[in-house]
Image (cartoon, helix red, strand yellow):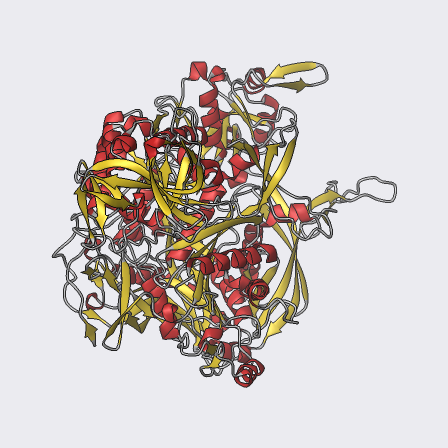
Amino acid sequence: MSYHSHGGSRSGRGRFDDRGGGRGRFGGRGGGGGRGGGPRPTECNVVMNYNRLDVLDPSKQVDLLVYKVTIKTARYVPQVNEAGEKVRNPETGKVVLVFTPWDTSVSEDDKFKKRFYASEKPWRIIKKLIKDRQASDPSFALDYDGCEMAIAPASCGLPVEANEFRVCIKQDCEEDNPDAMKVKNEWFLVSLTKTHDIPFSDIAAAITGRNSDLAEELSMKLNVIMKSIGVQLGMLQLAPNSSSLLFPLREQFKLFNNRMIETDHNKKFLLSGIKQVAVFSSTGCNIQSDPIVNWFDKDKYEIDRSDKIPLIDGRASTIAGVRVRFNTLRSDLRAQEEVLSALSKLTFNVEYWIKTPDPKKEEAMLAQGKTAQEINESRRRVFMNQSLRLDQDSKTKIKWSPDDHSFQLGESETVTVTQYYSRRYGIALDVNLPVVHIGKKHGWLPLEFCYQAFAKTRDANDTSMVQAVLQHYDKIAGTYFINDMAQKRNLISNMIGHGGKTFMEMLAKYNLCIDNAPTKLKAKVLIPPKINFRESKEATNGSFDLRNVVFANPAELNSFAVVNFTGDKHALQEYVNVQLEVAAGHGIKIPQTTMIVGRDHLSSITYDDRDAVHQGPEAVRRAIEKARDVYLNDSLNIFRQNHVWFRTTCEDMNGQPFNCLILPPQNHGGEIGIMLDVTEQSPLYYTHAIELSDHRTCATTRLIVKIRQSREACLNPFDVRFRNGRMQAWNSKMEGWGDVDFDRYCFECHLTNGDVVYVDARDCKQTYLHKEGDFRIDCPSMITMFLPDKGKALYDRVKFTSNQLCGIQTQCVVLESFKRQRNKNQYASNIAAKLNTKLSSTIAKAEAWRSSFKLGDSDIAGIPWVGECPTLVIGIGMAHGMGGDADTVIGASICLDSECMRLTTVAYLQKKADVINRNTMKDIITENWDHYCEDNKGVYEDPSPQRILVYRDGMSDGSFGRANDEIDYIREAIKTKTNPSCLCDRGCKLCCPPITFVICQSQHHVRMVPAQDSDGYPVGRGGVNVHSGTMVDDNTIIELGTLLKITDDDISYVRELNSPSKVYFGPPSPSYDFLLTAQGGLKGTSKPIYYRVRLNENAVWGPKGCTALTKENIANCTHQMCYKYGSATKAVREVPIIKYAKKLANQILSSLKYLREGMEWEGKNLHLEYPLDNEGDKDIRPYVSVVMDNGNGIEEEIDKKHNVVKFSFHNHLAA
């Protein structure tokens, strides 16, 4: 095994979000001397959660038959003769019943069909069919997909073409339920029609890697077979269309070492299972197995006991876990809302006993030979697996007393629910307890009859539940994962179904078998970058710290405002004092005047909104007003009395940025002036127009400063500052600052004859040439949000205001988090890194750290490959609305330089979809293209990107083909920037730089763990994880079908073109896909990102003097980028441009409700508009309409914004 050196300390685990610092990365906690020392390997052995699928007997041919399944509801109806009379059996006299499918079938009614196949009923029907058939024919075999497809081996015992079966199941429960006899039967007609077969020779060729043509179809068929076998073995489904299965209750004790994990007073428990998926690679087929756990509502306090869980707990005074006062529930609206919410998440059973039985009915039963026990049992009513249903008449699901609902009984009498149960069944209901509606069949039932049913827990996000799941995964982390998966594979392989066969025996019907030994591979461990602050740092397993470091390029914090939502002024002052001191220690440039404001006059820039009355926007607006009054108007007289000016940045109406000084009003209510940091040749150089006592005027003057040390010297106000209680001036000869004494202000007047004269400011009238209204001023640069807790609602409002209204960066600090810190400097260091990232701008290109990599014997700054020429690196992430929310938010980030640390972001809306539409993608590319070119003026002779690297998140395997459309849209957008006169329709290789399109899959079930402890890095509880930077690209597990092939014609074209912008590098590789675990996992099992390269033109051609983007280069580029997440001193799991894009998209998604309602800001009304989907309308995306009063009382739309982000001076949004 070969090695390269790395340090031996082990950092603690950190948490990084926008609401304050984490622990264990910054300021000294968690560092030094832990396990994991020694050299870092360059390769290691890993075990994957892949098991080989193989042919059981090569000499045996078992073709696979595919059937279309049609399920129709049916019933037995009386047979009638031509006269319409019921036909009776002449021997028994009973009415003859005929099995008849209903007119409305499952296969014909789309609405009913959708609801039907989303339920478990189709599975129960087919399971019953299989059980019934196997009772008479043990060779019968059928596997079902839960919808309209079934699969069977050629020896399944089915006729070749079409088959019809009558199937009877219980309406609301499984057939083996103890109360099944009390549940009505339901009949179905199942038709199986053969559609096609797959010869076993083709199956064997695909499974052994000799032919991949059938890989996609076979993968789907194998998934169906494995799930169906599991269901027949008694495993539990998480969802009808999910591949995840839970082990039966009888097996759960083994998996949890005979101790179930429970919560909510033993009303819920954690169940374990497995997800199996067939994956084809160039070498054949593997079964990917992943452990899963889920919370379930229990139907009994303990398994195999009869102690049911009532929804009403009188002793604890709760309904569905919600504490209530029963005698006041009818008037307590808050409690009603909570109870309704809790009940809506539950599945429940109904059970009650009739206390006044029907004598005639029981006499008849006795005459039929029924026992006393059977007669008594008939008095028990049971309805299984019910849930709340909306009553269409009252438009409600619950009423808060049985007296609140009445209905007609007979022809003339109206009774309440209370009266009905008393008269009919002799049951006295509690009038203080609710009744619930469970559908037309059963109507309104008293909640006191309801008991919790066994079902998957909905919204299992309670803190205790989340912690229990995390703790469970911690126990099977790293190398322990191997043992856990081996236990689960052995368990499922040896489970016995109702036919007496095991999983493996049932799979053998198809002449297939699974090797239970997991796949073992050789992995690469990529070299981490060198981390450069003002001094260098070594990363240890993907982590480094901020102890005693000065940032590489510190930001400037010229001004800030505060919104205090906590009411705790003392804690706020303590936090601000600590934060200013620590930030300055890391090199962040904070003027002495800002220090004074923060320490001595914090209330002057703070808006207190303890009760969150204004909930974000209005509170932020008032805080901004207070801060601008201090910094722009100099209301505290801090700048005047110290003879300095507030230094900041601004931009003109064309978006041109400038450094500037703010000239405060000369009198109360006067105008604010601006001095720009430009050369004398600029027309914006002059600051004032002056008028002397003899009425002579000059409009080409600039303010200067005279000092007592040298009456001849004229100081540029930009060369003056206030520090350590003294005025200081920059000495260009000494290249340093020195103390000086202020003398007076003067004006440098440039006369028309070319002469320059100096006028004492006290001897003339002055008028500002550049005023506040002519520029957009960066003030405040940052708003600190002091939040009482981590509640999402207030956080969403705050981020909405930052991202979409004011465009000012915000930093959230949680009071409770700050107070519990033992080392508050460490907490402030955490936030200082975030502040430095957020304060980066086009002018102040701040970076907390930089990185470099080895190339031969040289250290090369930046990210490998990216810095060779102007390279546009884009990350695109998506966030989708839930349920009926029909919006998708697309966030996009670009790297502004080769360090990939400074980003800018945009966000767009479209109708809910997994694929980005043409207009959105074109806007993303063109707007970010402009940002990149603007930021790189002067860095490159021509800053236009010469190649494109796109990281695309959120695309599933089924959408890979549609990624081609997105690539076309990218070309179309680039064409408008590089060669609009090109005759191609949407962009081609002539007018576009080479493109690499990488799909980043984070939601997958691939796991890699060290083969043994020596192959990994220690984690909690004694396990071992793979090293940070572990990369697997072995063809054994890399899936087929990703790469879009570059044709021979394309290559010939590029070679014939012979252009410096497109030099041929060499032929393409068959695949560039890889799995990368960039992060150093200290808890749980490190989960890699699966990078699927859809297109890689940069590997085949590119600009002259550049290198090809080989798999090795793209893996190293991606890995080193993961160290550039400005909010965390560690390698993050996914590339930061994706992480920031997704974070922004989710922030925007959470705030759409405010834009739908409409929002007023700075005299403008903003509202989210949804254009009508009219035929011929090219752009029907949602947009933000900006409306303003035109002065005549009429509102006019002045702007139509598709990019819903308010662009900030400090353009690193969502940091």
- The outermost residue toward the right is 83
Q: Nearer the viewer, residue 1037 or 525?
A: 525
Left or right: where does residue 145 sit relative to residue 775? Answer: right
Task: Confirm whether residue 647 shows in the render.
Answer: yes
Q: Residue at x 72, y 17 (%)?
A: 411
- The outermost residue toward the left is 33
For residue 706, which quarter of the picture?
A: top left
Image coordinates of residue 654 in percent, x first then y, are 51, 48
Image coordinates of residue 669 in percent, x first then y, are 42, 25
686 relative to 341, above or below? below
Left or right: where does residue 289 sit relative to residue 195? Answer: left
Q: Residue at x 14, y 67 (%)?
A: 38
803 relative to 403, above or below? below
Q: Residue at x 45, y 42 (%)?
A: 803
Q: Nearer the viewer, residue 1081 or 1013?
A: 1081
For residue 84, which quarter of the picture?
A: top right
Image coordinates of residue 1055 in percent, x first then y, are 52, 84
Q: Nearer the viewer, residue 1031 or 357?
A: 1031
Image quarter (top left, top right, bottom left or bottom right) of the N terminus? bottom left
Q: Nearer the viewer, residue 898 or 88?
A: 898
Q: Residue at x 50, y 77 (%)?
A: 206
